Amino acid sequence: MTSLPIYLGYKYFRSKKGAFASFTSIMAIAGLALGVAALVIVLSVMNGFERELQTRVLGVVPHLIIKNEESIENYDDSIARLIQAPEVQAASPYIETQGLMSFGNRARGVFLTGILPSIEKEVSILPEYMFAGSLDQLSPKEGIVIGGWLSRYLGVSIGDSVSITTTNLRSSVLGSFPRSLSLKVVGIFELKAELDQSLALIHHDLAANLLNLTPNQTQGIRIKTSDLFKANEIGYSLLEENLPQDQGFYFSSWQRTHGTLFQAIQLEKKLISLMLFLIITVAAFNILSTLVMTVKSKEREIAILKTMGCSNPQLIGIFLTLGMIIGFLGIFIGLVLGLLITPNIDSTIHFVESFTNRALMDSYFINYFPYEFRPSQLIQISATCIFLSLLFSFFPAYKAAKLNPVTILRHE
């Protein structure tokens, strides 16, 4: 009798006509599988966006920038004090200003950033994403590195010269005019992020010259921290312990410039997860309705089993087995669909873009669909679905165990 619940549970799962499963069981499995697949796909894509924000965007955007009310004098001394802190992995001088880049009849606003090419790889991942050329070709008097999207928009390539008009003014006897210069493109990077459209790199000394700074002066000190999510805490600590407190130093972090984007992704991820878990809950209701109909149609058989000595726990086990078969099949099919569909979303988007001749992703900070499967999330999804399957299977099973065989067989 120990195998009776399993045998009858599987028997009730099968169709009377010999098919693999009854129509109601197939519908219950399909509903649960679609809910699980949707949850896996959406969470994996949101994980990918979160990862790309942390690596590609925050790998280029400074974690911390130490600034001063005036320019920072003798920045080498300040950097030497800052790198003594255990939370600081690397530091370098940093200058940023706005400008208008033009080539031919096209122009685009850019953030003109002054860096030291020799130590840029210590504070940024940008050298790893150079599509053409090299940061090492930047010199104090020549050279600019731009993003791939910007190069295609302007129609420039390595060796072309672009015109830069800055917001800094140059005074002469005729009045004040924006400073402008012509720079040769010596490198192109490809982050596949929003920074490809607006970031342009020049040598730190050239940027200092544009801002009328001396070679030993800088606008700020860029810092790569050991924990980017504690950037603000580390910033306050550095100001108190590693820099003179009476010289007007302050800091700005990525959490102030790009923090809202990260928070938006986190909030959307939680809300979408909640909505999809509700969808799975609704799909699990199909198990309840399937078992209720099965119990109703099998009342005579249940009554006969009870008269033959079948106990209430065994009757509950029969319908719990039926519910768990539906639940496990729905979870398995949903996981397989999610794991197969997610890696192919990007190619599907490219197909739609080529078919409609529209760029669907250019308006987002990442112009492709990243994804990341996290085993802990897959286990959590599976465990939640198993719990819901058990929960919604128990009530019909309990009802079946409480049926009175005398009442059912009275008219037989």
Image: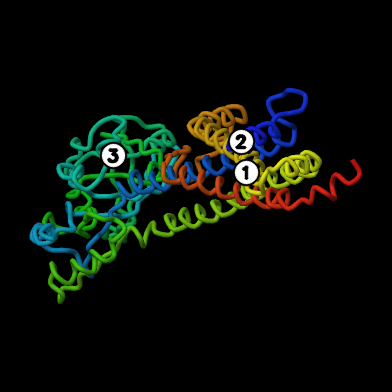
Residue 202 placement (x, y as % from top left): 24, 44
Helix, strand or loop status at disc 1:
helix
- Mark nearer the N terminus (1 vs 3): 3
Q: Given the image, on which type of amino acid does mark 3 rest?
A: Val
Which mark lies nearer to you, 2 or 3? 2
Q: Is residue 231 left or right of residue 316?
A: left
- Residue at coordinates 20% horizontally, 68% vertically from top-left? 237
- Residue at coordinates 83% horizontally, 49% vertically from top-left? 406
Which quarter shows the N terminus?
Answer: top right
Residue 335 placement (x, y as % from top left): 53, 36
| Residue highlighted by disc 3 | 145
Q: Which mark is residue 317?
A: 1
Total numbered labels: 3
> Where on the picture, by quarter, is residue 351?
top right
- Residue at coordinates 77% horizontally, 24% vertically from top-left? 17
Image position of 152 with respect to 166: above or below? above
> Where on the picture, by quarter, is residue 76?
bottom left
Q: Is residue 193 left or right of residue 223?
A: right
Q: Residue furthest top?
A: 18
Residue 124 placement (x, y as % from top left): 25, 45
| Residue highlighted by disc 2 | 6
- Mark nearer the N terminus (2 vs 1): 2
- Residue at coordinates 55% horizontally, 56% vertically from top-left? 271
- Mark nearer the N terminus (2 vs 3): 2
Q: Is residue 265 left or right of residue 2?
A: left
Q: Residues within 10 Å of mark 3 (few under 14, many from 20)?
A: many
